[in-house]
Each structure stands twice: as C-alpha cells, then as structure tokens.
Amino acid sequence: MTSNKPVILLLVLLLILVSVNVYQNILIDQKLLQLQSETKNRITQVPEVQNKAEEPLQEETDSFIQDKFTVRGVIRKEKIPAELELGEYWYWINFEEPYLLKDNASGWPQYIDKIQLFPPQDTSFYKLDDYLNKHVEIYGYNSWGYAESSVIQVISMTEL
C-alpha cells in the first residue's frame, strides 16, 4: 500500500488544481456576464438628441473660416529641386523682420523669415511675376503646401 501513496497524493493535487481552474472559469464567466449587462444598460440609456445635427456649433464653424491677414516683404522666385517633381519654380515672400506664423503644422507659433506664396485664384488681375524682387504688401490667408508646409494663398497685392 505504500507504493500507492504517491499516486493518490498526485491525484488529490490534480483534483485540487482542476477544481481551482473550474472555479476561476466560473468567476470569469460571471464577470463577463456582468460587464455585458452593464454595457447593454449603457447603450440603452443614451439620451436622444433632437434636431442638434442641423445646427453646427459656433466653434466648429469658426475653425473653418480662414483668417485673412496682410504681410509685407519682397517676392522672390526660386527653382524647385528636381527630385520633388513639383514643377519648375515657386514663389516666396521674404520678410524684412521675422514674421510670427501662428497657425502651422508644428502646432505652436514660430517666427519665420520667408514663406511660400500660392498665386491668386484669378491670375488675370495679379501675376506674381509682375512683382518679382519688388517690395509688396500681400493680403491673403494661411493654407497648406508641400509636406504640410504653411503657405500664403494670395488674394490681392500691391507694390509699396
């Protein structure tokens, strides 16, 4: 009978381990059922919003309005690096003093010495080439260029 003691002891330990495992599974199942019930309650208790989709929030509409501003400087035309495959030239306005660019891809205001220009939508009235190397005042708004760079979309301009 002494030779059966280790086997019986092993069986008892195995039975205890299986019982603990079964008990843990029961606890996990109960917790899952509880979470499922809580989730159902949250979903069914969502308040209904009536006619709010028709009225955009003022904050939302303000974020889509372009802030227009004026800048002064000298317009330059620079050759675009061939590897960028973006055309032949781009236009820049070089500032006499650093300009504080508030809205840009970095997420915080930065002082800049120059910024790229996009020509006006109607180029029959304003042609950037007519103002090359001249001191000008440009009225426009901030837009996005190559690789999320900041550019000024020109609306109007005058030589100073």
Image (cartoon, rainbow, N blue to C red):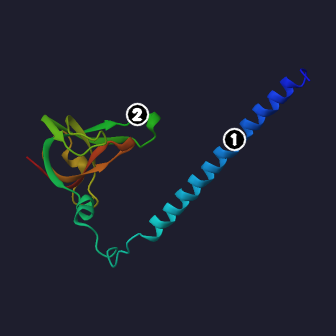
Callout 2: SS: loop
Is disc 1 surrounded by few (<14), some (14 to 19) or many (20+) residues within 10 Å? few
Left/right of residue 143 with respect to residue 100 in the rendered view: right
- Identify the amino acid type marked 2: Pro
Looking at the image, the residue that sits furthest to the front is 1
x and y percent of residue 33 in the render? Answer: 58, 58
Looking at the image, the residue that sits furthest to the top is 2
Question: Which quadrant holds residue 81?
Answer: top left
Distance from label 2 to label 1 (Cα)? 67 Å
Which quarter of the figure is the N terminus placed in? top right
Residue drawn at point x = 46 percent, y = 34 percent: 83
Determine which of the numbered discs, if any, sits on residue 21 in the image: 1
Callout 1: SS: helix
Which residue lies under the disc numbered 2? 81
- Identify the amino acid type marked 1: Asn
Question: Which quadrant holds residue 89?
Answer: top left
- Of residues 44 and 110, the one nearer the viewer is 44
Front tag of 2 and 1: 1
**Who comes first in sequence, dot 2 or dot 1?**
1
Left/right of residue 112 with respect to residue 90 in the rendered view: left
